[in-house]
Amino acid sequence: MMNHLLRRTASRSPSVLLPAVASLETLLLHRQPSSPSAVLDRPPPPLPTPTPGVRGFHAPALPLGFRNTPAASSKFAVADYDSYEDDRTATTHVSGADGEGLEIANLGIAEEIVSALGKKGITKLFPIQKAVLEPAMQGHDMIGRARTGTGKTLAFGIPIMDKIIKYNAKHGRGRNPLAVILAPTRELARQVEKEFHEAAPNLDTICVYGGTPIQQQMRQLDYGVDIVVGTPGRVIDLIKRGALNLSEVQFAVLDEADQMLAVGFEEDVETILQNLPQKRQNMMFSATMPNWIKGLTRKYLKDPLTIDLVGDSDQKLADGISLYTIVSDLYSKAAIIGPLISEHAKGGKCIVFTQTKRDADRLSYAMAKSYRCEALHGDISQAQRERTLSGFREGHFNILVATDVAARGLDVPNVDLVIHYELPNSPEIFVHRSGRTGRAGKKGRAILIYTQDQSRAVRLIEREVGCRFTELPKIAVDGASIDMFSTSGGGGRFSSSGGGRDRRSGDFGFGRSPRGSDFGRGGGSQFGSFGGPRTGPSGGGFGTSSSNRSGSFGGSSSGRPSGFGDFSSDRRSTSFGDFGSKQPSRFGNIGSGSSGGSRSPGGGRSSVFGDDNSYQR
Ligand SMILES: Nc1ncnc2c1ncn2[C@@H]1O[C@H](COP(=O)(O)OP(=O)(O)OP(=O)(O)O)[C@@H](O)[C@H]1O
């Protein structure tokens, strides 16, 4: 134990070494033993006497420099947000009545955080951060919703880091984490951990996720950490191995909460939450909070405060995103991507979202003949995924062709254009995909490519998301261009779902096979029925028989018990429905007629998320 403490302390600068050693006694008193054997080795230490009024995490806000107002007054931030929305032009934004109180340096936040954020050019709070800060410091459980790219990570991050820094200053540093943040994909978990690390470099943070050696993560945990960020599967794995002790956790966050509580994820999240102490602060954040989540949050949060900067009637996309649609037939879709990028990305970065991993591969392969681009999806090795993402971030190539593995949370600077190569499966996914551009007050464009028979689905997106598309003129493509985007593998010309057998399903628009989809939504697409109202028996799995799809795409069709088996390492749960599984599909019924297979018999959508898919994303 002492070794651990010394090792961990030794990684700090020499200036902190002596005080740290001097406070070793405090450390030993403060922390619980790391393992049962340690309990046997020595008698339990006497509990330190708490200093009244300062030890608790839920200490009054006043000593920390926050106004001592009731949490409900966080409404003020909504008003600020309105004015922010009104005059938002670039990255300078948040102005309250006089801007006072928004300067991070004036809020009593730990100097370490203020200075680290300052180095990144972050000196003022964004509206969601301002709205969350005070109630979070007061210890409230909360649900936070704000549009994509508006700084939700630091909204929950700043109060947590601040409290941990101050707690550590009083009690010394410990081995077990004080905060756990769960994210649905590996890339997002890494990004969140990085943001924490950059904002509080002296805190020990760790990111745990599958696809990487677990031993290394176990070693790091053994040294001691303050904050764990991870995907649920790996977190559970580490708990089971006895490497991760969550008994001291004071803060638990579900990032992308609606995804974390979707069918298949919730079970794992629940397992993790059961390992946390009862007394803790819970926070859930997302840009989308479908109605079904409300019941669930009651299960996990205590008297939560809802801070919703989006609202039900408002448009749900970030303001800086201009939306366009373009109609295309299936064969021409790949060929119009190039002209769209040249015209609309203006030399910046572009993410093209496909529905399936195979489409991502094929499209990027075909496009690589003319552009520098790479694919990102759940079948690619974790090491390659990380290389790809960092290459994209660093500008080594500017076009990323990705499945929805990249739809949520990823913050890549200067993505000027998002192309929905295929319709998303839900309005939520549309919001998240589109939200990869137009972040932090910047401007961006999102283009939705649709086929003629998907027009109604496009109108529904407008209605659900509260947005308005501008129709772009149709791009004429000649046979040569189409051929250029044909692929050799398995079926001739590139279509939205590849060639050969999938070509048939492509005819049904989105009601096509989910096979190979990172999120397995094909059959469960909320929009699926738009493309496939005529799917009769000839539609194969898209007719009524497909109502059993969750079964047939789970074990029976693939022979694998868990979804598509794409998401091997992190996941435990078997196949699960997509985000709509717990929400009544708002689109499923429209035109669903014979293609009712997009819904499971139980009412939830039946598509299968490759499990770790969500985790590995
Ligand atoms: N107060 C701030 N001032 C300037 N930039 C900020 C501020 N807060 C956050 N940012 C930056 O804004 C970007 C978007 O933040 P973040 O990724 O937290 O958004 P988000 O709301 O979580 O988005 P999403 O819903 O897509 O996950 C990041 O690059 C972040 O560093």
Image (spheres, rainbow, N blue to C red):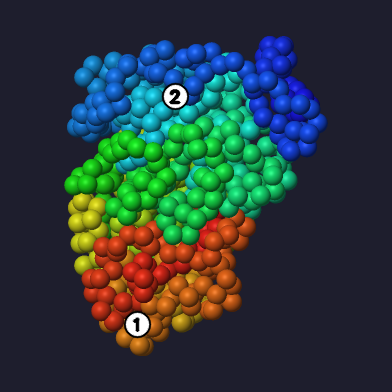
Please tell me whether mark 1 sits on a helix, a strand or a loop: helix
Q: Is residue 372 visible?
A: no
Q: CA distance from mark 2 to mark 1?
A: 54 Å
Above or below, comparing residue 323 to residue 518 in the picture? above
Q: Amino acid at mark 2?
A: His
Residue on which disc 2 sits: 58
Q: Amino acid at mark 1?
A: Thr
Please tell me whether mark 2 sits on a helix, a strand or a loop: loop
Foreground: 507 or 408?
408
Q: Residue furthest right?
A: 41
Comparing labels 2 and 1, the label whose residue is closer to the camera:
2
Q: Give the image location of residue 287, x and y in percent.
A: 34, 44
Foreground: 305 or 550?
305
The residue that appears at 34% across and 37% down in the rendered structure is 303
The residue that appears at 32% across and 55% down in the rendered structure is 292
Foreground: 350 or 139?
139
Q: Is residue 225 left or right of residue 157?
A: right
Q: Give the image location of residue 193, x and y in percent.
A: 54, 37
Q: Give the image location of residue 183, x and y in percent.
A: 49, 46
Q: For the residue carrying disc 2, how many other residues have a C-alpha within 10 Å: few (<14), some (14-19), or many (20+)?
A: some
Q: For the residue carrying disc 1, how many other residues have a C-alpha within 10 Å: few (<14), some (14-19), or many (20+)?
A: many
Disc assigned to residue 291: none
Q: Is residue 313 left or right of residue 235?
A: left
The residue that appears at 39% across and 83% down in the rendered structure is 545
Q: Give the image location of residue 348, x and y in percent.
A: 41, 44
Residue on which disc 1 sits: 544
The quadrant of the image that shows the N terminus is top right
* Residue 206 position by quadrant: top right
The mark nearer the N terminus, 2 or 1, is 2
Above or below, comparing residue 460 to residue 593 in the picture? above
